């Protein structure tokens, strides 16, 4: 259910983002309906990350990588890794003082790693990354993730230790990897 809520928030995020991108940056701050679309986009983002983290807790504590679900787990982890720069580039195209400061700091950081071609203060490059490259990649990864879940089915619970080992639970020990 938490994964479905994450996916639903992502749909709202994309739809509100399409409205914003179609009308262009000049409309975001001054036009009433666009302010509403921007607010929907912002809150869908909060919901998306909140539900993704709750989902991550759930799949971690139920050991949902078991039984051939390794690819499902990895695709989920890749989705999380791509979601972070997707959100960050959205923050950068706000164009206010905070986003400019972040862009310059992040540019220096990336330069130091040799990724100098990623020009974070360039609003055009960040716009392309935020509305096309990253969300499309993320959509493909989410599609693959959900496709794997549909194929494998939901992970069964961990075996009951009382029954599977035929002894009393001593109150310690790990169920990791079972
Ligand atoms: C873009 C973010 C994500 C979306 C939209 C998403 C969506 C989903 C959905 C719809 C399911 C079906 C079951 C459920 O609702 O819980 C699911 C299952 C699963 N997800 Fe995600 N997920 C995301 C991120 C992640 C992350 C970050 C991880 C872990 C690194 C992960 C690992 C898994 C695993 C292992 C399952 C299988 C659960 C089972 O078999 O019980 N997902 N995901």
Image (cartoon, helix red, strand yellow):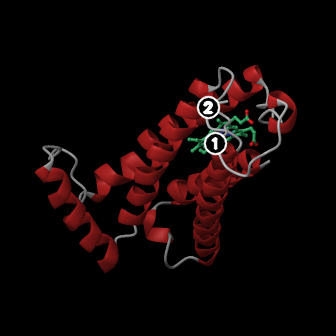
> Looking at the picture, how far across and down is residue 21, in whole percent?
51, 55
**Where is 110 relative to 159, above or below?**
below
Residue at which label 1 appears:
174
Residues tagged 1 and 2 counted as in contact (Cβ below 8 A): yes
Secondary structure at numbered mark 1: loop
Residue 96 appears in which quarter of the rendering? bottom left
Q: With 150 as the anchor, is 162 left or right in this view? A: right
Circle 1 crowding by C-alpha within 10 Å: few under 14, some 14–19, many from 20: few
Residue under pointer 2 = 177
Q: Position of residue 11 (x, y in %)?
A: 68, 48
Q: Where is residue 33 shown, x and y percent of the image?
A: 64, 72
Q: Of the residues tagged 1 and 2, which is closer to the observer? A: 1
Q: What distance separates the C-alpha of mark 1 from that of mark 2?
A: 9 Å
Tag 2's secondary structure? loop
Give the residue at x 75% y 45%.
4
- Quarter of the rendered image showing ligand 1: top right
For the C terminus, which image quadrant?
top right
Instruction: Name which residue lies at 34% across and 71% down.
Output: 95
Numbered label tally: 2
* Residue 103 in sight from this viewpoint: yes
**Position of 174 relative to 25 (above/below):** above
Q: Residue at x 24, y 57 (%)?
A: 122
């Amino acid at each position: 259910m938490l994964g479905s809520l994450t996916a639903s928030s992502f749909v709202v995020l994309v739809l509100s983002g399409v409205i914003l991108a179609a009308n262009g940056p000049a409309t975001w701050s001054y036009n009433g309906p666009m302010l509403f679309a921007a607010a929907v986009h912002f809150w869908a983002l909060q919901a998306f990350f909140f539900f993704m983290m709750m989902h991550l807790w759930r799949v971690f504590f139920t050991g949902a990588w078991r039984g051939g679900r390794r690819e499902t787990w990895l695709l989920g982890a890749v989705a999380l890794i791509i979601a972070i720069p997707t959100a960050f580039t959205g923050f950068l195209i706000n164009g206010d003082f905070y986003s400019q400061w972040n862009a310059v700091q992040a540019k220096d950081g990336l330069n130091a790693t040799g990724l100098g071609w990623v020009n974070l203060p360039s609003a055009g490059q960040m716009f392309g990354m935020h509305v096309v490259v990253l969300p499309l990649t993320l959509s493909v990864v989410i599609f693959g993730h959900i496709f794997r879940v549909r194929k494998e089915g939901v992970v069964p619970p961990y075996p009951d230790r009382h029954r599977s080992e035929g002894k009393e639970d001593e109150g310690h020990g790990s169920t990791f990897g079972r």
